[in-house]
Image (spheres, rainbow, N blue to C red):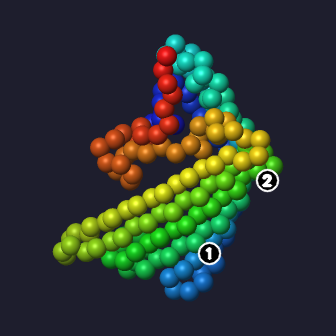
């Protein structure tokens, strides 16, 4: 988590159980259950506002289950050169634990060969998280929030530097 900020550290322990069912040569159905306990340690830096300190102390146990549908017509599982890969994921947290939220993601990659040694990749991702029941938006733990940056999401930005910001006063 040093990529996110030098103002806090996150210690996390967890367990995830995955299962996948191949429906046909192109379509897979996946299931998962995860439980994770996090603890956020805030530094004594004076540049952290009181509002930010309060939001960083949203840690504890998250218990969640989810489904995923994956369509994959690429020519290679690790180094594709042509084809389309699409993933629809959903997750419900609140099966015990401290937080309740629903998350959904739709991730797509389209590969086009350009010549013998090149591949053009088009990528589009959509992610959404919605607090439910007693959890409020500002109570979502910092390690569950969405951050972008780096070569795999937005080139030209450092990893985890594009995302939720705190208003400095």
**Residue 79, horizontal then vertical, whole percent:** 36, 70
**Residue 62, horizontal then vertical, whole percent:** 72, 46
120 vs 8: above or below: below
Q: Residue at x 28, y 73 (%)?
A: 112
Between disc 1 and disc 2, whose residue precedes? 1
Q: Secondary structure at mark 1?
A: strand
127 vs 107: above or below: above
Viewer can see residue 74: yes
**Residue 119, horizontal then vertical, whole percent:** 26, 69
Q: Residue at x 46, y 77 (%)?
A: 72
> How many numbered marks are there?
2
76 vs 63: above or below: below
Circle 2: is it few (<14), some (14-19), or many (20+) Cα within 10 Å?
Answer: some
Direction from residue 67 to residue 2 in the image, left or right:
left
Instruction: Measure the C-alpha gap from mark 1 to mark 2.
Output: 21 Å
Circle 1: is it few (<14), some (14-19), or many (20+) Cα within 10 Å?
Answer: some
Picture quarter containing residue 120? bottom left
Return the residue nearer the eye: 132 or 12.
Answer: 132
Picture quarter containing residue 30? bottom right
**Residue 83, horizontal then vertical, whole percent:** 37, 77
Which labelled disc corresponds to residue 163?
none
Q: Secondary structure at mark 2?
A: strand
Q: Residue at x 44, y 66 (%)?
A: 108
Q: Kindly identify which residue carries mark 2.
A: 95
Q: Kindly identify which residue carries mark 1.
A: 29
Viewer can see residue 11: no
């Amino acid at each position: 988590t040093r990529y996110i900020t030098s103002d806090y550290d996150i210690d996390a322990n967890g367990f995830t159980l995955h299962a996948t069912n191949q429906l046909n040569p192109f379509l897979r159905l996946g299931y998962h259950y995860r439980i994770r306990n996090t603890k956020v340690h805030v530094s004594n830096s004076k540049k952290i506002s009181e509002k930010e300190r309060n939001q960083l102390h949203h840690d504890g146990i998250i218990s969640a289950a989810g489904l995923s549908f994956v369509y994959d017509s690429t020519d290679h599982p690790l180094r594709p050169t042509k084809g389309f890969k699409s993933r629809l994921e959903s997750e419900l947290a609140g099966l015990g634990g401290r937080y309740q939220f629903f998350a959904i993601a739709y991730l797509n990659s389209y590969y086009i060969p350009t010549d013998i040694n090149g591949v053009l990749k088009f990528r589009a991702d959509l992610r959404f998280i919605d607090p439910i029941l007693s959890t409020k938006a500002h109570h979502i733990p910092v390690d569950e929030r969405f951050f972008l940056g780096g070569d795999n999401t937005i080139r030209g930005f450092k990893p985890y530097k594009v995302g939720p910001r705190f208003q400095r006063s």
